[in-house]
Structures are given as C-alpha cells and as structure tokens.
Amino acid sequence: MLGRGLLGLYLSVLVLLPVAALLAKSGSGGLDAFWREVTGPEAQAAIKLTLATSAIVVVINAFFGTLIAWVLVRDEFPGKRYVNALIDLPFALPTIVAGVVLLALYGKNSPVGIDVAFTRASIVLALLFVTLPFVVRSVQPVLIELDRSMEEAAASLGAGPLTVLRRIVLPTLTPAIVSGVALSFARAVGEYGSLVLITGNLPFKTEVGSVYVFGQIQNEDLPAAAAVSVVLLIVALAVLGALTLVSRWRSKHVL
Amino acid sequence: MSFSKLGLRTVALGYLALLLVAPVAMIFYRTFEHGLAPVWEAITEPNAIHAFWLSIEIVAIAVPLNTIFGIGMALLLERGRFRGKVLLGLLVDLPFAISPVVVGLALVLVYGKTGWFGGWLTEHGIQVIFSVPGIVIATAVVSLPFVARETTPVLRELGTDAEQAAATLGASTWQTFWKITLPAIRWGVVYGVVLTTARALGEFGAVSVVSGRIEGQTQTLPLYVQGQFENFDITGAYAAAVVLALLALGTLLAMNILTRRTRGRTTV
Amino acid sequence: MAIEARNVSKRFGDFVALEDVCIRVNDGALTALLGPSGSGKSTLLRIIAGLETPDAGEVEIGDEIVTDAPARTRDVGFVFQHYAPFKHMTVYDNVAFGLKVRKRPKAEIRARVQELLGLVRLDGLADRYPSQLSGGQLQRMALARALAVQPRVLLLDEPFGALDAQVRGELREWLRKLHEEIHVTTIFVTHDQEEAMEVAEQIVVMNKGKIEQAGTPRELYESPRNEFVMSFIGPVNRLGDTFLRPHDIQILTDADGSTSEALVQRVVHLGFEVRVELTLHDGRDVWAQVTRESAEQLELQEGQILAVRLPPPRVFAT
C-alpha cells in the first residue's frame, strides 16, 4: 500500500501535475483565446510545417525502413551483425549530437558540397536520422517470423516474385509498417534537439512546432507556448491512440 | 534473383551510409584532424568539465529513481488487480508522446516562479527551475517509461508460478521479490537501465527549457555542445559531441550484449 | 493432518469455478481430485494451499482454520503443474529454498537436502540447473523442494500431466510407494481416470464446480451415483437413458430365454482385450469387451449373428 502511494506520488509529481498544468494554462483564456493562439500566422505556419515534414518523413521511413529490415533478415553479407547493431544508434545518440553530426557533413562547410542548413530539407534530413529505427525495428521481427512456406506455396502456384511480394509479403508486414510509421510520426512531431542547430529556426520557413514553443517560452508568452504544446500533444496522442486501437482490434479479429 | 538482391542490399546500405555512418564518421574526422592536443584542451576546459560532471550527477540521481519506480510500476501493472490499469499504463508511457520542449514547459508551469507551486517553493527558499533539481526532474520525466517498459514483458513471460511456489515454501513477499522475481527479471531491468541512462545523458529539449542554460552552472554536456556551437567554438562543440557519441556507442554495445543474453535465457 | 473444506464457493467474473463444495480428507490419506478441465479441481487445490481466496466457505488443516491465512504460513507442500522451478538456482538451491527462508542452520539444510535428493533419486544432480533436467527429473526436484520443509500436507496439481506416457507410468508407481513411506496427507489433481484409479486410495469426482461423488476407486466404479461418474470412470455404453459396462455384456453361443440376438459389425483386437461392436435386434449399437480367449472360443466373425445377455441396466434419476 505504501509502495503504491509512493509510485502514485512520483507519477503525479513528474507527469500528472505537469500535464494538468499545461492543459490548464492552454485553456486559461477560454476556447477563443486558445483558438487565436493556435491559428496565429506564425503558430499556424509552424504547426503546418511540423505535420508536413513529419508526413514526408514517415513515407520515406516506410519505404527505406522496410527495405533495410528486409536486407537485414533475408540477405547475408559480411558485417551484417554490425549493421544491425548500428540501426539503434539514433536512439542512443543525444539529439543535439545528431544535429551537429549532420551539420558536419551536410552543412555550410560540407566536404561533399551539399549544404541543406537553414532549409526545409534540413528538417526532413534530421527527422529521418532520429526516427530511422522505428520502422526497421517493428518490421524486422515480423519478417523473421514470416513463414517462408507461404511464399513458396504462392510461387509453386505460379506467382512471380513481384506478385508474391505484393500479395503475400506486404499484406503480412503492413501492421508492423503502420506501427513503425505511427511511432515515427509521434516522435517527429515533437522533435527538437536535432533541429535546433541545423534548421536555423527561421519563422515561416524552418520553424517547426517544438521550436516555436521554445521561442514563446523565451519570450515569456506562456499561453501561446501552452496552446501550441497542446496541439502537438493531441496530434501525438491521437496517432498513438489510433495505433493502440487498431492493433487491439486486429489481435481480436485476425488472430 | 541474386542481381536484384544485390541491388536491394546496395540501396539499403547506401541509405544507411549516407544518413548514419558518413555523418558520424565525419565528425570524428573533423574532431581529430588537427591531432589530439586541441581536443584534449577543449574537453579539459573548466566549463566543459563542469558540464560533464553535472551530466553525471543528473544521471546518478535520475536513473536510480526511475529504476525503482520502473520496477515497482511494472510489478503493479503486471501483478496487480485493480480498475484503471490500462489507463495507468498509458500514463506511464505518456512521456514518450510528449515533445521534450513541452515537458520542459509543463514543468515550468508547475515548479516555475509563476507556476502552481512557485509561490510555496519560493517561500521555502527552494529553487527548482533554472537549477539542478529542475534538470533532474526534467531528465527523470523524459526517461521515465524505459525500465517499466522493458521489465513488464519479462514479468509477464516469467509468470506467477515461481513466486507462488516461493510463497508455499514460506517466503515472505519481500524475500520472494529479492530471491525469485528480481533475479529472474534482472536482464530486462538492466536493459531498461541502459536505455534510461543513454536518454538521461543525452536529454536536450526539456533540460534546455528548465535549466536556463547558465554556463558553468546549469549547463549539461548536451547544452554545452549547443553553447559552444553557437559561440563558433566548433572544436569545443565537436570534442564534447564526440565524448557523447562515444558514450552512445558504448550504450549500443551494452544493448547488443544484453539482447543476446536475454535471448539466450529465454531460449533455454 | 486432516484437511477439510466446507461450503467453499469461488467465481472468476461470470465463471463459477466452485459452488458450495465440501470435502474431507483423512490424516495420511492419498486422495485424487478427478474431473474434466474447468471442473474446479485445480481451484479447490489452490484454495486449500492459500493461492486463491474463496468467496465463501472455510478451509481447515489439522484443527486449525486457515481460510484467511496466507500461503506462506500454511505449511503446505505444493507441486505445480509445470513444476515452477527457480530457473536461476541449482537443484540443490531449489530444494534448500524453503529451509533457507526459514533460516535453518547450514549443516541441517545440507543434511536435509542430501536426504531428499536421495529420496527422489537425484543424488548426482545437485549442481545442475533446471534447464539441464528432463521433465521427470524436474518433477522429482519439485517434489523434493515441496517436501524439504516437512509440510503438514502435500498438494500436487496435475503432477504427471506434462510427461510422456512411459515416465508417467513410472512416476505414478513411485508416488504411491513414496506415500507409503512418508505418509503425509496428499491430494493430487488429475483429469486422467486411470491415473486416479491406479494411485489414489480415495477419489473425489468433480464436474462444473461441484462434487459428483467421493469414495474408493472400487466404490466409484461399481456403484456410481450418477451418469457423469459412470461415464467418467470406466468405459460405458449408453442406450437411451440406461447405461451398460461393455464387459458386463455376455456373448453366448446358444440362445435361451434371457438372451437376444445381435449382429457382429466389427471385431477389434487390442492385445489381451477384444472389442466387439454389435447391433442389437432392435437396431441399437453397443460394444462389448471380451478376453482374447473367449473371443477365440466364440470364433467371432464379422457379419455373424450371436446371442447376447445384457446385464440389468442402470438408470440414474436426472
């Protein structure tokens, strides 16, 4: 009982109270004020940019993540173990370091002549870096478990490799890809550390939602910061909530 | 068939090389291109050393707290019978859905000067925001779910038979936890601790908001990287970034060893 | 130590696991709880051990009411269906666990563990880990672990369920002998009537959360109280509302006033026993069990018409 009380206290101090305070602040001026903060030109531009870049990033992740998982499971080549271990690097690497690292190669003094610093492309690049593991790591175990006899059966019935991929493999992988995409999207929407150096934080151009929130905190405009924060929170929760519901529904009705 | 396989391999590895390997290799090259001396000088600079030890201090407080909380919460979620368990599970995972900057803001709204508890804290001479306690809290929030998340499935797989067997043999709840449950879940816990530590060491957004980023006082190592970069001290920024990157590579190594261990155990 | 459960009820959500169950097990007896899955037998065993709490009713061990006592204070030895080995401990440490948490002196623990490992024939395996043992060895380790603390009663949940047929047979006999040696009050749960008949002195037949009948194996076989017990214990022919044991059907070469005609559909040789599938003159199908010897004497052939004498049928009130 004492244990439960302490767990509850810890969770309240760290999560429950702060989230409640955030919601209270965003709603302190009423719904009108909230709406005004969220639809202000700069806030609106930041939110739209966040959603757009996150969407682009998850589409690329869905493709390359699945491809990488495929190569890691079905292909054999020297050093595969190390490549596999490397996939988790973006989770282990501090986000600010991710930003610095990308700038070193794709910034102003790029040795390869590619300079994306302070452009919208830099947002996509940084988000691709930090969200790389999600799709790979959710598709990989499903591919390992995937029964090859199913593919062989399809091939023996006269299906070509592309048909097998489209009709047998991809439908089986779809839930895992969707799950990886949802996690990537939630992460991309809130990302800050990897973007702060490489994007230049230019309003209306490269300023995403989290950067806007940070700016408003610096300006001590807490209601504005809280309002956009709540939007980011709702987007992430909606995506993860939908994922939970879909996977529950699937486990009840498919398996 | 093998031709297309080679093509897929080339595309996948090429993508990884361009996105991950080349940039990380580049920063190591840039850092050490003028030898070790300037790097050594940069990382032994007083503010850098202060930032390093502050980061260690934060980890030393936040990680044990989250480990105890995580194990307790996993036990509660997996072994407890009560209403609202699903909701509690979601609440524990919530920090993963919140932007670090938003975490920082939410903490300011509770513990800041004008926050809910601001008046009371000021009266009692306690400063949370713009000082170390705030950084500890922010770090603890963003790394909160890892241990619970890694421990819960291990507990589920373990089942309750061994714990019940211990009870019928006369062991108390506490004895059962230390002698039966904890040894059985230890690799799951350790894996969670490794992830917590990595996240705690590298946390930037939330700490950036609550710390005030005061050089030599509330500047953690990731904040120091940003500070030096913005002050055009590229060598200092790169050197500190390399220190963090090496810690990250150490984390990766630990994760891989642990994965093999936990897999090895479950296949027995 | 005698065990008694009085008016015990337990439900899990909407599922009624036990409804007003009463049993009494005498001191030193070897009793089987027999029933199909979902009959509540495991739940009853777990309630006696203190691993589940009954919604209503009382449990008594010896002369002590233990209904609200936690499992660890009840002094019961419990052997789990899948043995619940402590995987991170050696065989020695598994068996010593109960003594260690009771803080017994080291020398005493060592002597007791050695004695038990001898009793369950695991002498040489003290330093092995559970993952290095076979199913039968794990089973015996679990038994030694339960017996180490000298429990007042021994409870076993489907003790042979997960073993292959041959090991199962050996262990059954061994358990009976062990019981003769140590004479601790023992209850084991099983869904296998043959196992219950072979090992137990007393059988409690359970179905749908209730006790159908309790008695010696012979009592249950010879005078089952109802349809369920009759069909659960031993083979049975059902003819409408009446029941016949296949070996009570007599096959004769000559008809007389007490016999009727039957057509042989199929003759199945199962070693010593021969199974004869018959269609009676009124069109109903039954099967009879005869020995190989009498089958040869009768020169049974498919398509043959014989005289059969049916025993007085049993009818159970429903």
Image (tube, rainbow, N blue to C red):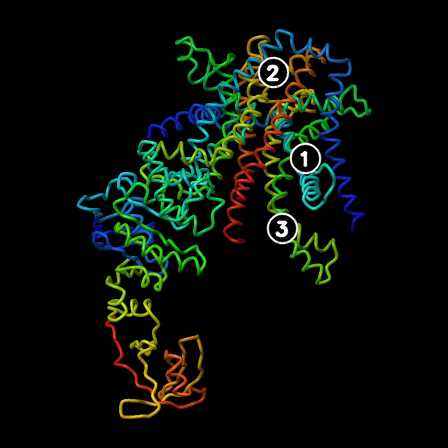
* Mark carried by residue A57: 1
| Label 2 Cα neighbours within 10 Å, binned few <14 / some 14-19 / many ≥20 | many
Residue type marked 3: Leu
Residue at position x 53%, y 53% in the image = A255
Q: Residue at coordinates 61% horizontally, 27% vertically from top-left? A: A92
Foreground of the two, A145 or A21: A145
Point 60% across, 10% down: residue: B49
Amino acid type for the residue under numbered disc 1: Val
Q: Which mark is residue B221?
A: 2
Residue C192, percent from left and from top: 37, 62
State which mark lies toward you, 2 or 1. Answer: 2
Disc 3 target residue: A146
How far is disc 3 from disc 2 in space, using C-alphas?
43 Å
Using the rendered view, name the quadrant where residue B254 is placed.
top right
Under circle 1, the secondary element is helix
Question: Do the residues marked 3 and 1 share a common chain?
Answer: yes
Mark pair 3, 1: CA separation: 27 Å
The reply to whether residue B164 is in sight is no
Q: State which mark lies toward you, 3 or 1.
A: 3
The chain identifier of the residue carrying mark 3 reads A
Name the side, left or right, on which A48 lies relative to C28: right
* Residue nearest the viewer, comparing A212 with C244: C244
